[in-house]
Image (cartoon, rainbow, N blue to C red):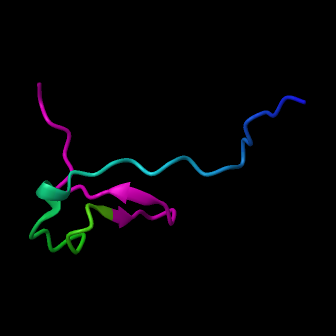
């Protein structure tokens, strides 16, 4: 019996850079914040994408 992915399952949380979150007052050093939709989102203050 094959199992299919559950489309209602939540997506896995993104990995955050804990070192960048250190001393961040916006997210309380968690690296994530709750957005206006109630979802866990990367902190816009400390989790900015790094340029290559």
Query: Is residue 52 found left or right of 16 in the rendered image?
Result: left
Q: Position of residue 13 (x, y in %)?
A: 45, 51
How far across and down, in percent of the image, does residue 50 sit? Answer: 14, 36
**Residues in magenta, as a range:** 33-52
**Magenta span contains residue 39:** yes
Q: Residue placed at 11% from the left, 65% from the top? A: 22
- State the residue lying farthest toward the front: 1
Residue 36 among those drawn in magenta: yes
Q: Nearer the viewer, residue 6 or 39?
A: 6
* Residue name at image x 20 percent, y 70 percent: 29
Q: Is 13 positioned to the left or the right of 51 in the image?
A: right
Occupied quadrant, residue 18? bottom left
Residue 24 spot, x, y in % from top left: 13, 68
Image position of 2 with respect to 40: above or below: above
39 on left or right of 52: right
Q: Residue furthest top?
A: 52
Q: Is residue 51 above or below residue 42?
A: above
């Amino acid at each position: 019996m094959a199992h299919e992915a559950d489309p209602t399952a939540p997506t896995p949380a993104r990995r955050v850079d804990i070192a960048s979150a250190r001393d961040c007052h916006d997210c309380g050093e968690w690296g994530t914040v709750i957005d206006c939709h109630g979802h866990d989102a990367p902190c816009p203050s400390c989790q900015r994408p790094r340029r290559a």
